[in-house]
Amino acid sequence: MDINKLKQGDRRALSKTISLIENGEFNSADLRKIFPEIISGDVWAITGSPGVGKSCICEYLIENWLNSNFKVAVLAVDPSSPLSGGALLGDRIRINNSDNSDNLYFRSLATRGQSGAIPSNILDIVNLLSALKYEKILIETVGAGQAEVRVAAVSQYLLLVEAPDSGDMLQAEKAGLMELADIILVNKSDLERANEKQEQLELALKLSDHETPPILMVSAKEKNGFEELFLEMNKVSNNKKPSMIKSKISLSYAWESLLWKHTDIDLIIGKLETNEITLDDAINLLKEGL
Ligand SMILES: Nc1nc2c(ncn2[C@@H]2O[C@H](COP(=O)(O)OP(=O)(O)OP(=O)(O)O)[C@@H](O)[C@H]2O)c(=O)[nH]1
Ligand SMILES: [Mg+2]
């Protein structure tokens, strides 16, 4: 690993370091030895069902940030769509923003299928990007499962995207994400049923006992509604209120990451598997090693 090149902002060095993080060979503790002081960038996550238009929306967010001269990094987590996956998003934003390419870094991350800890290293990757002075870090992730909730926990701000034709997420999962979202977007407002979707979401939010996020209508196709979105995003990042739910999820995510990094984890799982120890024993062994 070439630390000097990394510090100078060399792209290949950055990409290599991210691969090391993905392989568990480099983490935030190693990073702090190289960069003792890391100021966190603004980390936004964008999530929603497949095909709702997340990538199209990302393009406008990126363009807006680059126009304001921010240094922007985009992480596409597990780009799963055969039609519009992360590689395509990467190509599109690189082409559209080639004038600004020094200020833009794109990386797709394949995370599913790793044992247990999905996506266990994203926090380390975000820290690395922050250390390299990326000011806006955007994470696109598909769906509403556990992985997305974790991504939301790593990020400071969450955009949840819906569309009139979006396949419905599991109600319980969606409710969880709606509580975490800072802004809910109904994309494809050019389509007829968009209003209906907005009304459904408003009804669903009425049932919540927590403070609820604003719902904005946008059309990435017609580039409508984005000025309002940018204003709302500024509001969110200026008045970020403490959130108990988010703190809980962040803590449990951080705790679980520790678990999977425990040096004896494989040994302990092996003993559990063969009934050599009970769950209580396993917990005690884990605690000893922390
Ligand atoms: N009518 C309409 N179509 C849109 C709009 N925004 C995106 N689309 C279309 O929706 C499809 C999916 O857009 P993407 O931006 O790739 O959606 P995504 O959520 O990133 O998809 P995955 O990453 O595969 O989950 C594309 O065919 C877009 O052209 C919109 O505002 N209106
Ligand atoms: Mg996408």
Image: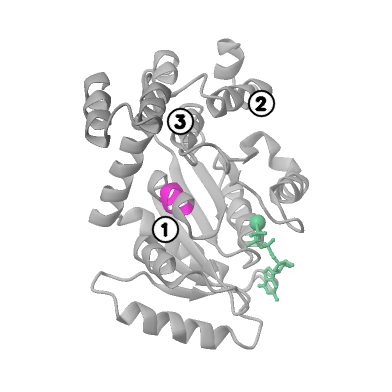
Q: Nearer the viewer, residue 129 or 257?
A: 257
In the rendering, which numbered label is found on residue 6? none
Residue tagged 1: 234
**Which residue is denoted by mark 3 in the rendering?**
124
- The residue mark sitting in front, 3 or 2, is 3
Residue type at mark 2: give it: Arg
Q: Secondary structure at mark 1?
A: helix
- Residue 241 in the figure: left or right of residue 168: left
Q: Nearer the viewer, mark 1 or mark 2?
A: 2
Tell how many labels.
3
Of the four image quadrants, the one with ligand 2 is bottom right
Q: Is residue 69 above or below residue 129?
A: below
Between 37 and 140, which is closer to the camera in this rendering? 140
The residue pinned by badge 2 equals 11
- Measure the C-alpha gap from mark 3 to mark 2: 17 Å
Taking the image as shown, residue 111 lies to the left or right of residue 42, namely right
Question: Looking at the picture, how far across and down is residue 145, in whole percent?
Answer: 48, 57
Q: Quadrant of the N terminus?
A: top right
Q: Earlier in the sequence, mark 1 or mark 3?
A: 3
Q: Which residues are magenta?
A: 148-152
Residue depicted at 54% across the width and 87% down the height: 195
What amino acid type is highlighted by mark number 1?
Answer: Asn
From the viewer's perspective, tell me whether residue 269 is left or right of residue 277.
right
Q: Look at the numbered disc 3 and say if its residue's Cβ is closer than 8 Å to ligand 2.
A: no
